[in-house]
Amino acid sequence: MILVLAAAAKNIRSAAGRMNSRACGVPHGADSVRRTTEKSIPYSIRRTPYLYQIVSGLLLVLSYPSTGWGFLAWFALVPLLASIHHAQNHLQALGFGLISGILFFFFSLHWLTHVSTVGWMLVVLMQAVYIMVFAWLAYLGIKSHLPVVFKVLWIALAWTVMEFLRSEMPVFGFGWNLLAYSQSAYVPVIQFANVLGAYGMGFLIMLVNASLFYAWFERKVWKTALSLIAVVILVLGGLWSYGTMTLAKPVTPTEYLRVSVVQGNIPQSVKWELMAKEKILEIYEKLTQLAALEQTDLILWPEAAFPGYFNRDLQAERISRLAQEIQTPLLIGGLEWESEKESYNSAYFLKKDGASGQRYDKLKLVPFGEYIPLKSIFGWLTPVADALGISDFSAGTAPVIFRWAREDWPFGVLICFEDVFSGLARDLADRGATFLTVITNDAWFGKTSAPYQHLQASIFRAVENGLAVVRATNTGVSAFISHQGRVLATVKDPSGEETFVMGQKTLDLPLVTERTLYRQGGYLFPYLVVGIFLIMGLWIIRRNKKV
């Protein structure tokens, strides 16, 4: 870089000298020398587009809770695309994407520092790599000889492919803060998720970003610019129209189920302390008894609310008696112990007579939180994990549909971050669930935006599958979500606080079982995108070779 600057400075001095000579009668031609000299200076030095990707990273951060200004997502990536357009080579494009990605995940996932600062840094880097690769793919399209319309399409396809990989990657998949989730507060807009899901929404958001970028870049070619603006208007208008029509369509619930959630607000620091066990059980007993006074049909406890191995602890009998006394079924989050090498993070269903019903064992465990993945590679971390108190759970083998007193009310359970995996929720819906439940802890992350970011995933699972979702959390946000993604109610204290408060909430949950277009085949959209992306990739390679 220093050599480039030095050479540029030398050229400028030479040009300046020739210009002075012209003033003394030297022959004409200095203007062309000056223009040539300016072109020899890299654009990145003259205009420093490094600021552009920083702007994109920050706009993305602001699109999610805590601020939650989701409207920013519709143009947040335009500056990054501008940076990529100015990139001089592949490596610079990769760097621009990495900067945006690191900034976005650095701030939006900062709550991970409450668990592990090193872990947070590693997750930030891993997630940023996907945006880095997207930037490189976008660079290939931007610098290609494709017509503008295909460049816009390529950018949207590339983003969707990378989000799909980021979410569904075996072992390390972490679909947190997908682009679509930024729209969770705009109920009319997110109705389109019942057609193509969160990936389809993300595709359209990126399509708008790419169209806005090229509308500005091609503004002198007015036909192209107007066509791209028309795409933006069509997408936004279409989403709003579809959403308002969907919400206006009369829907009669098949039934109302009276459900209660209890939020114990147990600090993570004392959750597994032996001396705190009795106090924890007392809290959940009292909250459960309060909920029972409201003539509820079902009461949900959060993930691992029972402070021990439910199948081996004598105190489990106490909870069975509680269900019998209040004559109300309970869904309890607890641990299952099978052997020294086999234990599970589970959900237990207790019938109203206190008898134990079905059990669901969590399928998707948190890597390096609930188990050490790929032990042939990372097995050396086991002693470190033990010292940090990381669990070593076994994964469940199959989803479970809880069937109880009425066959009309089967439901499925997702534990902790399982609700970020759209396939798990869809599988439960296809197996006959009439509503979904999410039980989680969330106490790990302190009073941060994490619970609200987590809530966004549950909202999309509700819309995609056309099913209500009930969330029971230890520290918040415990919520009831309609099949259209409306948050109907949450557990709050008198001041309106939803996190790190103790309480319970009962609601008549409208049961609407609608087989959405997403469930009928819309979930295949990301696979279609991958196919089109590969075909376009080959087309770009061949077209560039011919030129």
Image (tube, grey):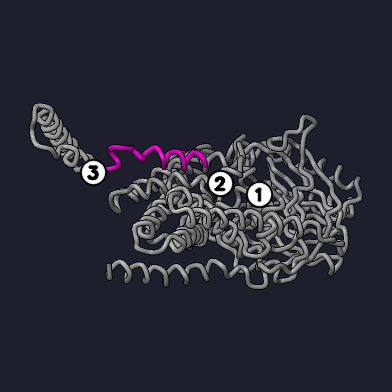
Q: Is residue 543 above or below residue 291?
A: below
Dot 1 falls on a residue whose secondary structure is: loop
Nearer the camera: disc 3 or disc 2 = 3
Pick whichever of labels 2 and 1 is earlier in the sequence.
Answer: 2
Residue labelled with disc 3:
39
Say what secondary structure mark 3 lies in: helix
Q: Earlier in the sequence, mark 3 or mark 2?
A: 3
Q: Is residue 438 left or right of residue 322?
A: left
Chain-order first, disc 3 or disc 1? 3
Which residues are drawn in magenta?
Answer: 40-59
Asked if one can make out residue 276 in the rendered structure from this viewpoint, the answer is yes
Q: Quadrant of the C terminus?
A: bottom left
Q: Amino acid at mark 1?
A: Ser
Q: 91 or 507: nearer the eye? A: 91
408, above or below 9, in the image: below
In the rendered picture of this protein, how many numbered marks are placed on residues? 3
Q: Position of residue 185 (x, y in %)?
A: 68, 46
Q: Quadrant of residue 13?
A: top left
* Residue 387 percent location from the top left of the image: 46, 43
- Residue 146 place in picture, x, y as percent: 38, 64
Where does residue 283 sit, x and y in percent of width and height? 77, 39
Task: Look at mark 2 in the image and give the residue it sits on.
Answer: 73
Give the image quarter of residue 339. bottom right
Q: Label 1 belongs to which residue?
A: 184
Quadrant assignment for the N terminus:
top left
Q: Nearer the viewer, residue 123 or 200?
A: 200
What residue lies at 52% left-to-right and 70% top-to-bottom? 527
C-alpha distance separating marks 2 and 1: 12 Å
- 388 and 67: which is toward the camera: 67
Q: Residue at x 50, y 54 (%)?
A: 211
